[in-house]
Image (tube, rainbow, N blue to C red):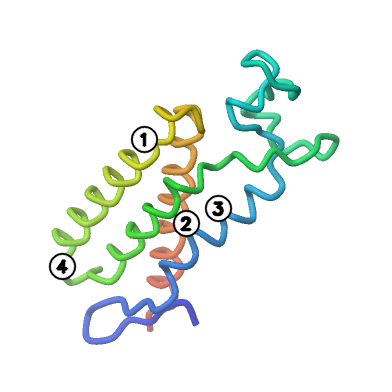
Amino acid sequence: MIGEIQDGYIKAPLPTTLVPSVTSTLKQISSSYYPWDLLRYGDAHPDVHIFRAFSADRAPGLCLPAEHASGALRLLALAVCWLPARSWIASRTALLAIAYGGIVGSRQQIRGAHFMTQTLWSIWIACAIVVALIVTLQSAEP
């Protein structure tokens, strides 16, 4: 089970593995390449529009979503553990985790390893996973 509600708190033993697991899976099927792999920056691969990144007719580029940012965003799932009883701690934890994921993603952008949109998509995906987790756990509450 992903988690359970106990004494007013969500006890979630696996949420911190969901973000990196989903990110890694999406990365394996994404045809978005690293900036240094693109034709316009001197390599051999064409640029792929973000909404065509998961096309079946292209080879995997292994770049979207940004995995460094997603690794840091696994901390976002910790916010779930304080819900619903301590939502103020949960919200601060979530904001700090998003900021940390953004910082880690920015570092990769400075290196030329990712575009900003790839980091922003990683943040969005992590937030969507955590919101889905919260909705799932709250709907399972007796």
Regarding mark 1 in the picture, which secondary structure is present there? Answer: helix
Residue occupied by mark 2: 129
**Residue 113 relative to residue 54: left or right:** left
Regarding mark 3 in the picture, which secondary structure is present there? Answer: helix
Contact flag, marks 4 and 3 (Cβ < 8 Å)? no
| Vertical relation: 106 (above or below) 126 | above
| Vertical relation: 92 (above or below) 6 | above
Real-space Cα separation, disc 2 to disc 1, in angstroms: 23 Å
Image coords of residue 134 (percent x, y): 38, 64
Amino acid type of the residue that numbered disc 4 sits on in the rendered structure: Arg
| Closer to viewer: mark 2 or mark 3 | 3
Q: Work out which quarter of the rendered image holds the C terminus and state it.
A: bottom left
Sequence-wise, the earlier of marks 4 and 2 is: 4
Q: Residues within 10 Å of mark 1 (few under 14, many from 20)?
A: some
Q: Which mark is residue 86?
A: 4
> Which residue is at 22% across, 57% downward?
93
- Judging depth in this view, the residue of 109 and 135 nearest the camera is 109
Contact flag, marks 2 and 3 (Cβ < 8 Å)? no
Amino acid type of the residue that numbered disc 1 sits on in the rendered structure: Arg
Asked which quadrant contains residue 36, the reply is top right
Regarding mark 4 in the picture, which secondary structure is present there? Answer: loop
Sequence-wise, the earlier of marks 1 and 3 is: 3
- Judging depth in this view, the residue of 73 and 41 nearest the camera is 41
Image coords of residue 105 (percent x, y): 40, 38
Residue occupied by mark 1: 107
Q: Residue furthest right?
A: 57
| Closer to viewer: mark 4 or mark 3 | 3
Q: Which mark is residue 23?
A: 3
Amino acid type of the residue that numbered disc 3 sits on in the rendered structure: Thr
Asked which quadrant contains residue 69, the reply is top left
Image coords of residue 63 (percent x, y): 60, 39
Sequence-wise, the earlier of marks 4 and 1 is: 4
